[in-house]
Image: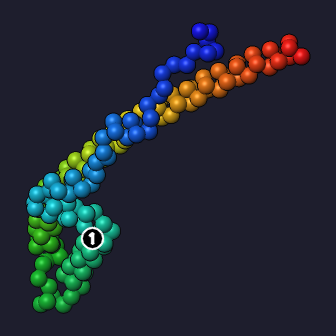
Amino acid sequence: MSEHTRIEARPPSLSEVKRQRKPVRNVNEEHVRELSRMERLALAVTERVGTMGFFFLIAAWTVLWLGWNTLAPKPLRFDPPTGFVLWLFISNLIQILLMPLLMVGQNVLSRHAELRAESDYEVNLKTEHEVEVILQHLEYQNRLLEKIAYRLEVKNDTDATNA
């Protein structure tokens, strides 16, 4: 057979490709299912503390505390303005408690990001495989068209010589 009449093996059909394809995972659901109660708590705190609302709450609390203990009548002041010892103590206590909790929340968010990246990679591999199958089909169709064109040219040449 000549090069124009030879057709290579047919590429896989759509049903074959679908049968070979693994189902897409929902990593968001997987991540939520795997969280412990403490991780859920850390995540909830991390999501709330990392907002402008929390920042404004702390800023307002600080302004009110320092303003009251600086400007209120002396008998009503409860934290001396020279050191604001109670304010510093409470602020440091909040920081000490929030820091490890935020780190746990960030670790949970990081694990979720890793799962999403892994899922994206799997989807990219599937897409690459399916694009490869599409290209195989295009090449196969191109070979068929070349074969048809070759036969039409041969037929037209014989028709022209017979006339």
Asked whether, in this view, residue 152 is left or right of residue 139, the answer is: right
Question: Measuring 82% from the left and 18% from the top, which residue is drawn there?
Answer: 159
Q: Is residue 13 visible?
A: yes
Label 1 belongs to which residue? Answer: 54
Furthest toward the front, the residue is: 162
Residue at horizontal 80%, vertical 20%? 156
Q: Count how many numbered circles sit on residues in the image.
A: 1
**Disc 1 residue type (three-letter):** Phe
Q: Nearer the viewer, residue 127 or 116?
A: 127
> Looking at this view, is 124 or 39 the one in front?
124
Disc 1 secondary structure class = helix
Q: Position of residue 3 (x, y in %)?
A: 61, 11
Residue 121 in view in this figure: no
Q: Quadrant of residue 117?
A: top left
Residue at the spot 57% in from the left edge and 15% down from the top edge: 6
Which residue shows up at 61% across the image and 25% down it?
Answer: 144
- Quadrant containing the N terminus is top right
Q: Quadrant of residue 60?
A: bottom left
Q: Position of residue 145 (x, y in %)?
A: 65, 26
Q: Is residue 145 above or below residue 160?
A: below
Residue 163 in the image: state x and y as whole percent. Answer: 89, 16
- Residue 55 to residue 71: above or below: above
**Depth order, front residue of 64/8:** 8
In the displayed structure image, the side of residue 155 where residue 47 appears, left or right:
left
In this rendering, position of residue 106 left or right of residue 121 = left
Horizontal relation, residue 38 to residue 151: left or right:
left
Q: Report the coloring of the rendering.
A: rainbow
Around disc 1, counting alpha carbons within 10 Å, would you say few (fewer than 14), some (14 to 19), or many (20 or more)? few
Q: Position of residue 16 (x, y in %)?
A: 38, 36
Name, please, the residue furthest toward the top.
1
